Image (cartoon, rainbow, N blue to C red):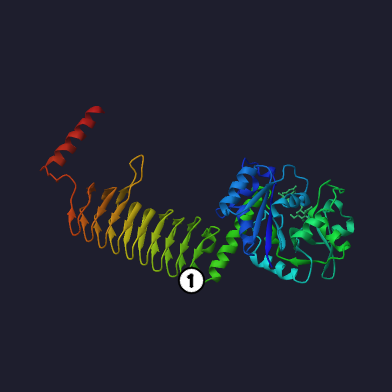
Amino acid sequence: MTVNLIVLAAGQGSRMNSDTPKVLHEIAGAPLLHHALTAGAALNPSRIVVVTGTGGDAVAASAADWHEGTATVRQDEQNGTGHAVLCAAPALEGATGDALVLYGDTPLIRPETLAAMQAARLTCDIVVLGFDAADPGRYGRLVTTGDRLDAIVEWKDADEATRTISLCNSGVVMADTATLFSLLGDVSCDNAAGEYYLTDIVAIARARGLTASVVRCPESETLGINTRTELARAEHAFQTRARADALTNGVTLTAPDTVHFAHDTHIGRDAIVEPNVVFGPGVTVESGARIRAFSHLEGCHVSRGATVGPYARLRPGAELSEDVHIGNFVEIKNARLAQGAKVNHLTYIGDADIGPRSNIGAGTITCNYDGVSKHRTTIGADVFVGSGTMLVAPVTLGDRSMTASGTVVTTDVAPDAMAIGRARQVDKPGLATRLMDRLRAAKQKDH
Ligand code: UD1
Ligand code: CA
């Protein structure tokens, strides 16, 4: 069954106390909106519509950034969730199959939960995602008879008896697209909030002889974000889940609570991640790699058998082949390191290619930026770069070449050659003691 995704993201989020629209606040390095879209994308939707409001242009740009085929429509006045869904109707003109409504500020919905809703749709016209609330508060209540859903009653409109129901509405709804819009056509704003409630479609559907049912999920999946505190709580919930998933997938985390994942971190089986490692977006770590303590990685790839850190920084475009060693206080950016290359201490490698088995000495720097443009450093196979070498790019070191410690390399080095680019050492006998005596005497006189 095809599915069209409608994501409601018109909320202004005034309780965030922010200039940024609520759904663009991030957890695990991605906007809340992207989390909702990604969950919905697991059902392989044919069309996706995001309903925007305040800060609509920024939200639309972010939606397009997630996937260029994502349509956005604007809801200028927030007249309720039913009205918001109706705003998506023109963008879904002629769409067939189901519609799934998600909230852009609810990032923790699991794809498995949405798949369960899709399965439930096979035997019923409207499927609503519900949860047993620890504290039902002001959530809409699900009025059921056995497995059947009779109505959703908003807290504001509920009598005392209905308010005692603990089964609550998450807001996530799935129904045939045409049916959904047809039902919404009958919704009125004659209620306590004076809004068009999406939730009213259940009672209307039942009156038309259609069926409705509830799929339940853990309350944690439906956590909606309205404040910075809830944002922090969602981040924590995401991290807890990501750590548990990594452990289940065969990754060793020696101190799970100190490892921070991004929304898209991929770590292979039998990789080892030591304490206090932070993964920014876009990281893949293959099986058997080891990420040592206090390392920070983003936009990079670490192959099988490689080790990184402790205290290493891999920035976007760092590509580590098998058995590469990156040591402490090393920064790698936009650089490919071939199999077995070693960069072990206090080094910056940016915009570079390093050949197999080459060894980069301590304190080496690729001088990749001239103040205007970036330039590439190319290092061949089995090269030995002496400690403290400055590689002034663009520059190439041929296979098996060497640089002497402290060399400033400004021109290409031929294969098998040794580059020595530093002043020749001169020793002055006795000068050290004479100089110290003079300095001490001068200081004595001052006092
Ligand atoms: C809604 C549900 C309630 C449910 C709760 C779960 C309705 C009428 N009520 O209540 O049953 O328990 O969510 O969190 O649906 N939005 C728009 N445009 C609007 C109004 C809302 O885009 O005009 C978006 C909001 O940005 C938000 C979502 O829809 O992402 C829910 O809106 P909100 O006002 O928070 O609904 P609740 O009153 O919490
Ligand atoms: Ca809400």
Question: Where residue 170 sits: x, y (%)?
Answer: 74, 59
Looking at the rendered structure, the secondary structure element under dot 1 is loop
- Decide if residue 175 is on the left or right side of residue 388: right
Which is more toward the observer, 109 or 155?
109
Q: Quadrant of the N terminus?
A: bottom right
From this viewpoint, which residue is outermost toward the left? 429
* Residue 71 position (above or below residue 248): above
Residue 241 percent across, percent down from the top left: 60, 63
Q: Which residue is mark 1?
A: 269
Q: Quadrant of the C terminus?
A: top left
Q: Nearer the viewer, residue 433 or 335?
A: 335
Is disc 1's CB within 8 Å of ligand 1? no
Q: Amino acid at mark 1?
A: Arg
The location of residue 19, given as percent across then percent down, is: 62, 40
Q: Residue placed farthest to the top in the image?
A: 446
Instruction: Please say whether residue 274 is visible from this viewpoint.
Output: no
Q: Quadrant of residue 233?
A: bottom right
Q: Is residue 241 visible?
A: yes
> Residue 251: horizontal and vertical position, in percent?
50, 69
The number of discs equals 1
Q: Residue at x 18, y 38 (%)?
A: 436
Query: Residue 263 lies in what quarter of the image?
Result: bottom right
Crowd tier of the residue under label 1, counting other residues whose Cα lies within 10 Å: few below 14, some 14–19, many 20 or above? some
